[in-house]
Amino acid sequence: DGGITQSPKYLFRKEGQNVTLSCEQNLNHDAMYWYRQDPGQGLRLIYYSQIVNDFQKGDIAEGYSVSREKKESFPLTVTSAQKNPTAFYLCATLGRVNSNQPQHFGDGTRLSIL
Amino acid sequence: AQSVAQPEDQVNVAEGNPLTVKCTYSVSGNPYLFWYVQYPNRGLQFLLKYITGDNLVKGSYGFEAEFNKSQTSFHLKKPSALVSDSALYFCAVSRGGNFNKFYFGSGTKLNVKP
C-alpha cells in the first residue's frame, strides 16, 4: 500500500540488541496497529494506537515497545527481552476508530536473528 | 472468546474451475467481515467486506463472498480461478466500536494449477 511505508524491509538483530522498525503513513488515518505474523498462525496484535500520545497493549506486547508522537508515525522497538523475535512484522492503519472500514497494511519488515 | 477459523491450510484448484476458501467465526454482536489477500513478502491487500444487507458481496479481481448468519460463515468464492490467484488468503472479523480490534484467521494458501 503506497500510503504506508515500513522500513527497513529486512532487519537482522544481534543477541542483546534492541532494534526499531519504522512505520510511516500519509493517509491521515487515526489508528495504527502493529502485528506479528508467523507461519500458520495468522496475525497477532502487538500494540495499537487510536490517537497521538496514546497506545495500548495488544495480545503479545511483552518484549516490545512503541511510541506515537506524531499522527503519521508509529515505530516499534523489539527489545532484547523478546527472546523469539524472528517473524514478519506488519503495520496497519484505520481511518476512524469506530468505522466499518478495512485496515490498510504496509509491506512489512522481516526480522531475523544473527 | 472471539475467534476466526479457516479450516483448510491449503486449497488446490485447477485453473478455470470454481474456488471456495472457507471461514467461520465466533464473535459476539454484529461483526464486520473482511477478506484479504497476501502475496509473498508483501502486506495484506483488502478484497471485500460485509457490513450489512445482501448476503453475497462482490469485491476485487472477480472475488465474491457469501455471508451466512446462521452458520456464522463467510466463505470466499470465485467462479473461475486464475493461476495469478495463487496466494495466501485471510479472513478477518471486526466488532467495530470504540476500538476496532480485528480478529484474523490463520490463513489459507490457495494453489491454482494450470
Image (cartoon, rainbow, N blue to C red):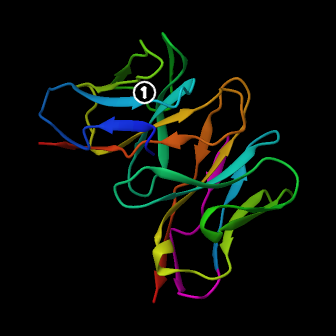
The residues colored magenta run B1-18
Q: Split into 4 quadrants, where in the image is the C terminus of chain B?
A: bottom left
Q: Measuring 42% from the left and 61% from the top, which residue is drawn there?
A: B39
Which residue is located at x 72 percent, y 38 percent?
Answer: A100
From the viewer's perspective, is residue A10 above or below residue B82? above
What residue is shown with label 1? A61
- Residue B104 vs B58, above or below: the answer is above
Q: Quadrant of residue B77?
A: bottom right
Q: Quadrant of residue B62?
A: bottom right
**Category of crowding for the residue at label 1, using alpha-carbon neighbours closer than 10 angstroms: few (below 14), some (14–19), many (at least 20):** some
Q: What chain letter is assigned to the residue under label 1? A: A
Q: Which quarter of the figure is the N terminus of chain B placed in?
A: top right
Height in image: A114 above or below A67? below
Query: Is residue B52 shown left or right of residue A111?
Result: right
Which amino acid, mark 1? Answer: Ala
Q: Is residue B13 above or below residue A55?
A: below
SS state under label 1: loop
Q: Is residue B113 left or right of residue A95?
A: left
Nearer to me, B20 or A69: A69
User: Is residue B48 magenta-colored?
Assistant: no
Q: Residue at x 31, y 45 (%)?
A: A87
